[in-house]
Image (cartoon, helix red, strand yellow):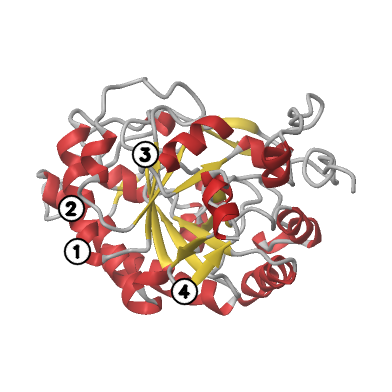
Amino acid sequence: MANQEHTQEPLFQTFKLGNITLSNRMAMAPLTRNRAEAGNVPGAMTIEYYAQRASVGLIIAEATQVSAQAQGYNATPGVHTPEQIAGWRKVTDEVHARGGHIYLQMWHTGRMSHTAFQPGEEAPVAPSSIRAQAKTFIPGAGYVDTSLPRALETAEIPGIVNDFRTAARHAIEAGFDGVEIHGAHGYLLDAFLRDGSNKRTDEYGGSIENRSRFLLEVMAAVIAEIGADKVGVRLSPVSPVNDSNESNPQPLFEHVVRELEKLKPVYIHVVEGHTGGPRDNAPFDYEAIRKLYSGVWMVNNGYDKAMANEAIASGKADLVSFGRLMITNPDLPRRFKENAPLNELFKDAPLYGGVGPHGYTDYPALAG
């Protein structure tokens, strides 16, 4: 048995993550699908969607609002009402029944929103009153520009930190094995990090230390609430998605990771390059930030089986997350193990939204 384990491909080794043992070193990346039902509650198809993918070592469920204010897109789930918590409980129960493990990614979309999604149709909130050059979809209106946000008052920030803390407790109540804080892709916490979107002059703006403060306060609060062994964070140092802009990312993210090391989250999940695009869109030394952190390192963006095995074998990563390959291949670990052909995205089904199972729960698994 020891010999067999020794010759096993790195991707299929079991792995200890906090207090759980993953069946392999593959993760399902958090993937917004815009399939939540009335009240932003996960429904029956969402239960089946995640349960179908329970053979992956860790599912990171789609970005989920920590409050009503946190919403920026249509039909995205929350974890701030009793109905939403109950809906997620059905998802986690089914994933666990099929032998899987599942974390919840928690987000606040910040300026990536529209007044149509905000309580009282108020302006979305952001570090500064700078509109993102981006769009969101509103039923009946189609794709529209995101709204001009208002700058958060300094006194409001502790309330949002508390929203994340409470949402983390709700996630554990809903049966999740842990949570991932969304600190990437131009959403609220990431927007505070970056000088392109943060022009503040209070203790949350200006220096790298100040711009990092909000993310680190959220991490500290969530860790205090549910324990460091159940809390990860996602970062995207050089991804330009959602009008994300930073003039000097290397020292910024070295500082962030150095401070995260003090908090001991269970993992850091790094999107390398341009999310869903080129991995070399901007110079960045990922190895430098990797060396600053002693916990589990997860990598993402454009990995195939060979790249993933190499990343793990070389020590560059402990876990590798897969996005679209997990959408189209509910049994991706088996397909990788057997070198079986991979499904392609259906051309006649939307990636975001849609009605019925097509393009959501009807991607075929291997027979037998």
The answer to which of marks 2 and 3 sits earlier in the sequence is 3
Q: What separation in Å lies between label 2 and label 4 (alpha carbons)?
A: 24 Å
**Residue 108, placed above or below residue 279:** below
Q: Which mark is residue 124?
A: none
- Could you say whether the residue bearing mark 3 is in a helix, strand or loop? loop
Other residues around mark 2 within 10 Å, as few (<14) / some (14–19) / many (≥20): some
Q: Which residue is mark 2?
A: 258
Where residue 185 appears, x then y in whole percent?
41, 39
Q: What separation in Å lies between label 2 and label 3 (alpha carbons)?
A: 16 Å
Q: Which residue is mark 3?
A: 236
Type of the residue with mark 2: Arg
Q: What separation in Å lies between label 4 and label 1 (alpha carbons)?
A: 20 Å
Q: Is residue 160 left or right of residue 39?
A: left
Type of the residue with mark 1: Lys
- Identify which residue is drawn at 71% across, 50% down: 35
- Could you say whether the residue bearing mark 1 is in a helix, strand or loop? helix
Q: Which residue is mark 1?
A: 262
**Residue 35, placed above or below residue 274:** below
